[in-house]
Image: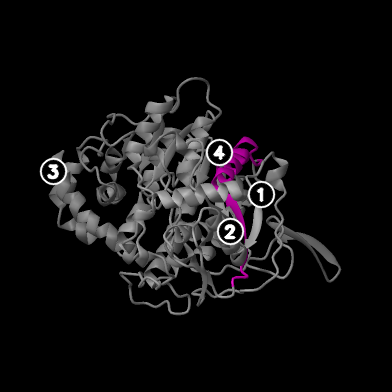
Amino acid sequence: MACIAPAVASLQAATTARLQSPLASACSAAASSKAGFKCAASASRVLPSITPSPLSQHVVSQIKSSLPRKMRRSVSVYATSATEASTQAPEGNSASSGGSSKGRVMVIGGDGYCGWATALHLSEQGYDVSIVDNLSRRLFDEQLGSQTLTPIASIHDRVRRWREITGKTIALYIGDVCDFEFLADAFQTFEPTAVVHFGEQRSAPYSMIDRNRAVFTQHNNVIGTINVMFAIKEFAPECHLVKLGTMGEYGTPNIDIEEGFITITHNGRTDTLPYPKQASSFYHLSKVHDSHNIAFACKAWSMRATDLNQGVVYGVATPETEKDVMLINRLDYDGVFGTALNRFVVQAAVGHPLTIYGKGGQTRGYLDIRDTVRCVELAIANPAKLGEFRVFNQFTEQFSVRDLARLVTAAGEKMGIEVKAINVPNPRVEAEEHYYNAKRTKLLELGLQPHFLGDALLDSLLNFAVRYKDRVDGNQIMPAVSWKKIGVKPKTSVTTTPAA
């Protein structure tokens, strides 16, 4: 089994190259390690003890795709921890213990910010849960030289600790949904009744760094989602797809934003049509493509799907992640992956001026991460009908960037922290003053009880940022990705000099 090491080492470089140049193939790297691949084919199905690092785990699906077809399934990865792994795939009906299951939910992208919190919440609520993830979000940090504010454990240690605390097992499938054979294997093994799809590159700035990242984002997000659709069609036709979309698909129109569809009258005729989309980055465009593809699959294949057009998420703690330090979620504050409110509270904690892009009138929908996990649960518990494509606008309040800066400034003053704000050139191409009124009734009708952004929540979030402020890298705070300056030359760094 140790002879897989040369293959893994070779493919680590190939995988990094794939993310830097998405159309490049790992085959050339694989060619130099044929002996290693031959040995890998006969290795145990469980590789964590051989390849414990996140980067090694990320390339396992690349290893499998480089093997002869008949040998691929023998190197799929199934594990529950980095130190304890079974030699068998997770049993189909034993993902959780302690009572009957509400259903079997596959969380794609379950190692990420929203995915991890959602996986724990659904497990706590009595669902059998599996996580499918290629750990690429951790690789993005390695690429950009950044790190989460919070020290997060490996995914294997996370799920092991969850089982130790709760007695509930989360099945873990390490691989890339862009590799359909891996995905098919995971579907046939776990047999989901619902799929929650977070498994996409989620950052607009990342998609605007250079041509390579733009292509990677489109390929990863669109092809990955198409693979999920085909897996449902082939292996779980009654499965409910709950797809994380974004309110950014709508843009900022000068009319009210409806929930997915709009009824219009034109030249005397009336119809209900998908709401017009005005995406503002290659990331947002990938989400638009997803929505169109899923809507088509619902019509053509009678697939059932709920598209959750989510606003900007803030916060870090949920009741489940607070159970133990090893369950803590990531919190991004950098200019590439950090969202507005999370960035502001971290900037306040370290004494950096709040960075308001342009005039600061950009208004969006926002929600607490505790509401994110509850919205997903509500969508699963109240599934779409076969053949139905429905859209929920998933946010609880609207704020402008200026509004958020004022709220964080006031929260800092209450804690004795002097908070200043500066207007910096807007790296994005967007309206900085505009009308914005989005509808959000469907999840409320299903029973969502929102956590609104009040003083107590801001105080808690700011205290959390102060606790970990020694981990903040000042070079990651200022925006360094320009929508207008994106080019074809690959960038290896997007850091800036800290503001004075």
Say left or right for 74 vs 338.
left
**Secondary element type, mark 3:** helix
Q: Please, what is the three-letter code of the amino acid marked with disc 3?
A: Cys
Q: Nearer the viewer, residue 73 or 352?
A: 352
Quadrant the N terminus occupies: top left
Residue under numbered circle 3: 3
Q: Which mark is residue 390?
A: 1
**Residue at 51 percent of width and 72 percent of height:** 422
Reply yes or no: does residue 377 show up in magenta: yes
Separation of disc 4 and disc 1 at Cα? 15 Å
x, y percent for residue 458: 56, 51
Q: Earlier in the sequence, mark 3 or mark 4?
A: 3
Q: Please, what is the three-letter code of the amino acid marked with disc 1?
A: Arg
**Secondary element type, mark 4:** loop
Q: Please, what is the three-letter code of the amino acid marked with disc 2?
A: Ala
Q: Nearer the viewer, residue 422 or 193?
A: 422
Say left or right for 290 vs 262.
left
Disc 4 versus disc 1: nearer the observer: 1
Q: Which residues are magenta?
A: 360-385
**Secondary element type, mark 1:** strand
Q: Earlier in the sequence, mark 2 or mark 4?
A: 4
Q: Please, what is the three-letter code of the amino acid marked with disc 4?
A: Cys
Separation of disc 3 and disc 4 at Cα? 39 Å
Separation of disc 1 and disc 3 at Cα? 49 Å
Residue under numbered circle 4: 239
Residue under numbered circle 2: 410
Classify 73 as above or below 125: below
**Residue at 28 percent of width and 37 percent of height:** 82
Separation of disc 3 and disc 2 at Cα? 59 Å
Q: Nearer the viewer, residue 323 or 156?
A: 323
